[in-house]
């Protein structure tokens, strides 16, 4: 059962959770993938509720989002197994089925093709309405050094030298799985 919510009534809980880690779930070519994120914004754009995610160029999740511009944000609400965020933040969807590995329960979504995840029940269903790659020349030197070091190996899944693409997702449904 899903309890529909007014997303901004839960803004404090959502943003606190993002700071600690939430799941960004995608689905393309029949494969569901979840990635832990701790960068995201909740707001309003074009008069619509928006959740914006930032995904590095070489992530499997970016490939998924470019194929299917829909996603869910799966937010801890109450007790949960913290290893979910650990594994989804360190394993790559290129080679690991994280849903199967963690035995996560997929819940059919209501307005998008990407499922929700019962174990992280506060769910935002989103449709991408705009995307833009970060302009590396517009990023401050301080942030480039801290978040995009160019003197590291960029070939592995956890590499952090890539810049991000921002995906602005209109929140078309918000609920808590009960």
Image (cartoon, rainbow, N blue to C red):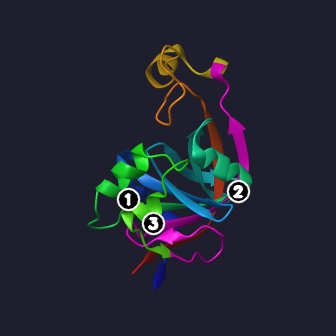
Across and down, in percent, residue 169 comes to: 64, 55
Q: Residue at x 46, y 35 (%)?
A: 158
Across and down, in percent, residue 109 comes to: 58, 75
Q: Mark 2: which secondary structure? A: loop
In magenta, the rendered stretch is 107-136
Residue found at the very far bottom of the displayed protein:
1
**Residue 157: which disc?**
none
Could you tell whether 136 is left or right of 150 in the image?
A: right
Question: What is the distance, in whole Å, between disc 1 and disc 2 at their CAs?
Answer: 25 Å
Q: Mark 2 — residue?
A: 69
Q: Is residue 78 above or below residue 132?
A: below
Q: Quadrant of the C terminus?
A: bottom left
Could you tell whether 141 is left or right of 36 in the image?
A: right
Q: Mark 3: which secondary structure? A: helix
Count neighbours of disc 3 (C-alpha within 10 A) and say few if under 14, some if 14 to 19, many if 20 or more: few
Q: Quadrant of the N terminus?
A: bottom left
Of marks 1 and 2, which one's residue comes earlier in the chain? 1
Count neighbours of disc 1 (C-alpha within 10 A) and say few if under 14, some if 14 to 19, many if 20 or more: some
Q: Mark 1 — residue?
A: 13
Q: Mark 3 — residue?
A: 9
Can residue 72 be seen from the camera position used here? Answer: yes
Can residue 16 be seen from the camera position used here? Answer: no
Q: Residue at x 59, y 22 (%)?
A: 139
Count neighbours of disc 2 (C-alpha within 10 A) and say few if under 14, some if 14 to 19, many if 20 or more: many
């Amino acid at each position: 059962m899903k309890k529909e919510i007014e997303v901004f009534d839960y803004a404090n809980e959502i943003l606190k959770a993002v700071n600690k880690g939430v799941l960004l779930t995608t689905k393309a070519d029949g494969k569901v993938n979840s990635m832990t994120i701790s960068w995201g914004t909740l707001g309003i754009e074009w008069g619509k509720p928006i959740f914006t995610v930032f995904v590095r160029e070489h992530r499997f999740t970016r490939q998924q989002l470019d194929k299917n511009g829909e996603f869910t944000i799966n937010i801890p609400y109450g007790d949960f197994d913290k290893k979910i965020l650990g594994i989804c933040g360190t394993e790559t969807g290129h080679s690991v089925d994280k849903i199967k590995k963690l035995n996560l329960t997929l819940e059919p979504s209501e307005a998008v093709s990407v499922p929700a995840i019962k174990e992280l029940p506060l769910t935002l269903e989103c449709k991408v309405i705009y995307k833009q790659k970060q302009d590396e020349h517009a990023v401050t030197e301080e942030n480039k050094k801290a978040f995009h070091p160019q003197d590291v190996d960029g070939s592995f899944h956890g590499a952090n030298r890539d810049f991000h693409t921002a995906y602005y997702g209109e929140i078309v449904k918000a609920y808590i799985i009960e």
